[in-house]
Image (cartoon, rainbow, N blue to C red):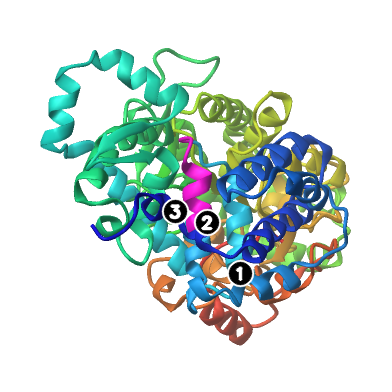
Amino acid sequence: MACSDEAKLEMVGRLLSEPGRFAYGGLCGVTLSLLFLEEEHRQYRMKFIKGLVQWLQLSESVLPVMEAFANGMGGEGTDTFADLLLKEQVLEGSPILITQDLVSFSVKDGYYDARSRVLIRHITCLLRISFEELETFEESLVKSLEGCTETESEELELYRKTKDRKKKLKRYFLIGLATVGGGTVIGLTGGLAAPFVAAGAAAIVGTAGAAALGSTAGIAVMASLFGAAGAGLTGYKMKKRVGAIEEFEFLPLTDGNQLHITIAVTGWLCTGKYGSFEAPWRCLLQSREQYCLAWESKYLMELGNALESLLNGLVNIVAQEALKYTVLSGIVTALSWPASLLTVANVIDNPWGVCLNRSAEVGKHLAHVLLSRQQGKRPVTLVGFSLGARVIYFCLQELVQEKDSAGIIEDVVLLGAPVEGGAKHWKPLTKVVAGKIINGYCRGDWLLNFVYRSSSVQLNVAGLQPIAMVDRKMTNVDLSSIVNGHLDYMKQMDTILKVIGVKTKDCHSEDKWNIGPIFNSDENCAKEGKEATKDDVKLNSAAKVESQAANTQSSFLSGK
């Protein structure tokens, strides 16, 4: 190869000029302060910025300045650093190389922190890069690592025969890789980044070097990111009954691996079209690796059939007319419910109460499954409706109580959630969610109102109203024009996901700038981290819903 050994070791971030590398570090530092300035994230901020300074080979004298940026001091805006970075000649109009370098840096130790991915999303937005390009790179990186574990060079095979395999693998896990391939010493971090530099792997490290890197570092990183078993969440099953929980299992919605995963939680089942846990999520495509949680199907089927029976009967027609005024006026009380409806309350009350209790237990168990890293060390997005949203809510509550729970959850979407709607209950959840917390509600959901008639006199329920909390992570979405009743959360799921900005199969290819009706990257990035209070997103007509869905660019955005 014509490249010198020194050139072979350089990565994109290190090819920048000194001002460019300072701007790169400064951009990340300021963004860290905008997104994660809370005290509970201080250790993460300091570790990230210190590692980045070393990664970029900046002078140690720069570290105090970068730490100051990460701690919210200095006042420099992200625009200044972004503009300086975009002028770097080495990027040649391809700022995506910065995003690629950040991903490589973030996964180099086999741990993709959810906060790192939210930061990368935000910087991707600032550099005006298509979010689809970030996801494409992540997929390419996974494929590269998967290929690394399957193919070994002859040179490496010969080397492995001379060493004890267990000791070598342990060394790779603990201190990183420094192996000889093609006469070049290749570091773990450089090896991960090299295949995606514009010149290609062979031009940077040589074919033999790339092969040697892949089959060793790839094994270590893959085992950490995706779990040692390599089976993902599908390999998890309860070995024994946990408390009152009888069923808890992950079912795959898609094939393949990805650096971030999505778990969908169904709220009930019913005979017919919606008799499976997968049914509501057939259009979901938030990640290339998705699962749905199968839980307590016996009780959820009983509940779903009870809901259908209640709504399809004469009582439903009478009740809707009788409640039309009181629901819309927001003054429903136990005394407002017609006697005809109360006489059949037992049809729904018992299965609802059973599922209400079991969903809380399932949520707590889900938290401990995620804490045990059954999914590997990757960001997780949670999406659920009705009692599925309740599962997620109690999962987050449990995570708040546990140590080392930050950096697992990227985003959460709760639709029609039968949980407390007070801000004091939701504020602690922001500690364990790196990105967005979405509360989708319907003011006219009389069924949800009805089942809470006795357990919550004040009717302060998240699925019926916005969460009155000023926090950049919290977004309320009024779905009243889409959801006419509680059962519509299942039946209208595709439309709901599009409007909120969650990627679906029939609209993901339209993503150009990753700008959705709820998660607007232009608006959010321009906020410069100032705590922007986002008002309720109201969708007042079918035409507006259609327009919103058409403009949805499929993903949770910059984390702002």
Please tell me which of labels 1 and 2 falls first in the chain. Answer: 2
The residue tagged 3 is 10
Percent coordinates x, y for residue 158 in the rendering: 12, 26
Image check: 294 left or right of 125?
left
Query: Few, some or many C-alpha atoms within 10 Å of disc 2 (few <14, some 14-19, many ≥20)?
Result: some
The magenta region covers 101-110
Using the numbered discs, state the Cα–Cα distance from disc 2 to disc 3 in whole angstroms: 6 Å
Q: Secondary structure at mark 3?
A: loop
Residue 59 drawn in magenta:
no
Using the numbered discs, state the Cα–Cα distance from disc 1 to disc 2 in whole angstroms: 22 Å
The residue tagged 2 is 14
Q: Nearer the viewer, residue 93 or 426?
A: 93
Q: Taken as a whole, is the magenta stretch helix, strand or loop?
A: helix
The residue tagged 1 is 125
Residue 107 drawn in magenta:
yes
Q: Dividing the image into 4 quarters, which one contains the C terminus? A: bottom right
Please tell me which of labels 1 and 3 falls first in the chain. Answer: 3
In this view, 164 is above or below 505? above
Percent coordinates x, y for residue 170 in the rendering: 37, 18
- The amino acid beneath tag 3 is Glu
Q: Nearer the viewer, mark 1 or mark 2?
A: 2
- The amino acid beneath tag 2 is Arg
Query: Few, some or many C-alpha atoms within 10 Å of disc 1 (few <14, some 14-19, many ≥20)?
Result: many
- The amino acid beneath tag 1 is Cys
Q: Are marks 2 and 3 in contact (CB under 8 Å)?
A: yes
